[in-house]
Amino acid sequence: KYVRNLTYLTLSVFLILKLSVFCGTGSDVPGPVVCLTVVTALVSLWSLRLRRRDAGTERRVCVLVLGDIGRSPRMQYHALSLSKHGYNVTFVGFLDTKPHQDVLQEERIRIVSIAEVKGVGVGPKLVTYVTKVIIQCLQLLYVLLRMELQSHLLLQNPPGLPGIAVAWLVCVLRGSRFIIDWHNYGFTIMALSHGQRHPVVRVAKWYEHVFGPLATHNLCVTNAMKDDLQENWGIKATTLYDRPPSIFRETPLKLQHELFMRLANTYPQFQCEEVEVEKTIFSVRDLTDNSVTLRAERPALLLSSTSWTEDEDFSILLKALQEYEGFIKGGASLPSLVCAITGKGPQKEHYRKLIDSLHLEHVKICTPWLEAEDYPVLLGSADLGVCLHKSSSGLDLPMKVVDMFGCCLPVCAIHFNCLHELVKHEENGLIFRDSQELAQQLKSLLSEFPSSEGRLGLFRRNLRTSRGQRWDDNWDQNVLPLITAP
């Protein structure tokens, strides 16, 4: 590195001296050559400055997500794992929702908030999109080139436009190593709303194919994606399965009750008709000894989480809940349901209007937004999870199911190609293909509720005995060697 920097400096000095000779002798050298000489000299000197290392450079890593940090759990886990191994992390992204408290309290993690760019609000959509990309490029260049030199830059994809190209350019200029964490393909997500043949989708696909292979290292979320990256993109990637961190676990009764009480202050679905100070529709606290018990006549708590985007069709769940209501009205011995659907996203209001129009008697639906600390507590308190994530590429896995399994929460998940890498049908949950099949699964799993002797209890026991690696061990095994490699 010293020799390389010395070469840059020598070249720059040589070019400047040569330019001085030309100017001093009144040479007839063409103007463009003079300009090129000046630019080359300045770029060389600037590159030398950008690459200037110090004692702490090798212990600094930039984690970049061109999205909301608070809703990017995997990247938060990356930042925490890096900090645990003594790296100073600069975490760059939007700060729309609060990240997990562990991230905020970690001294080695510094969050650099960037503003979400909207683009020009007038004219054709293409103009808006192009201006948005240009402004984001300039914004990222400004932020990344101003920070201290980082040994690595770890980028989440998607979204990768324009992040991949900008991050690669910055790494070239600064001599940093570039890592892409492939969660999915951006162009397949764009195709959900625009169609496969849309020009923007085609450009996005070309873009990922051109710039994706330029990374020093690549991570991905499934073996199916690893194979696809190798065969169709020429990219060698390391599979880093999503694993739940230790905060995802079964929730003790007292913590369940405290969360239910907080939710009951906002959501009537958690409120008990009997007006008592320490009672919710699920739990009750005995004020004589402060003990907490679950009510025998409680409804089942069904939980789903979502980003309310096109890759999740929640009409499937709503139709299944209507059929479940019909089972009860038809005389089936089934518990009432409280269905909590957590998350934020563009289609939330659309589905809230559909929910409000249902007027169900035995099924209550709410759409709470939870703080990062409360989300695992609610997962660990639920009776059954439902996942409607249908991968746009067929190559990624729903992280929400990973979190549910960390809480030993059985899941009903909609089928897609590589789902079997996570959900084992009839072992830790069930896989469905349409609303009718989901409705029958709900009926079957909840027929013996709240007894733990039925299929639902069996799945939970299987999850307790088959817990795999947690995030920390998985990260240490697969990512740390890439970071520490020379």
Image (tube, helix red, strand yellow):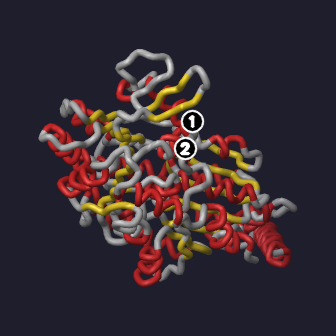
State how far apart marks 1 and 2 are (Cα): 6 Å
Residue drawn at x 74%, y 61% is 50
Q: Residue at x 42, y 49 (%)?
A: 131
Looking at the image, is 422 positioned above or below residue 134?
below
Residue 28 location (% of width, % of height): 68, 73
- Between 453 and 192, the one nearer to me in the picture: 453
Quadrant where the C terminus lies? bottom right
Residue 446 visible in rendering = yes
Residue 215 in the image: above or below residue 438: below
Q: What kind of residue is marked 2?
A: Thr
Which residue is painted at 54% across and 31% down in the image?
292
How many numbered discs, if any? 2
Q: Position of residue 75 (x, y in %)?
A: 58, 55
User: Tag 2, which secondary structure?
Assistant: loop
The residue closer to the viewer here, 116 or 430, is 430
Residue of label 2: 251
Q: Position of residue 111 (x, y in %)?
A: 66, 45
Q: Are marks 1 and 2 in contact (CB under 8 Å)?
A: yes
Three-letter code for the amino acid on which mark 1 is drawn: Leu
Asked whether the viewer can see residue 172, the reply is: no
Which residue corresponds to mark 1? 255
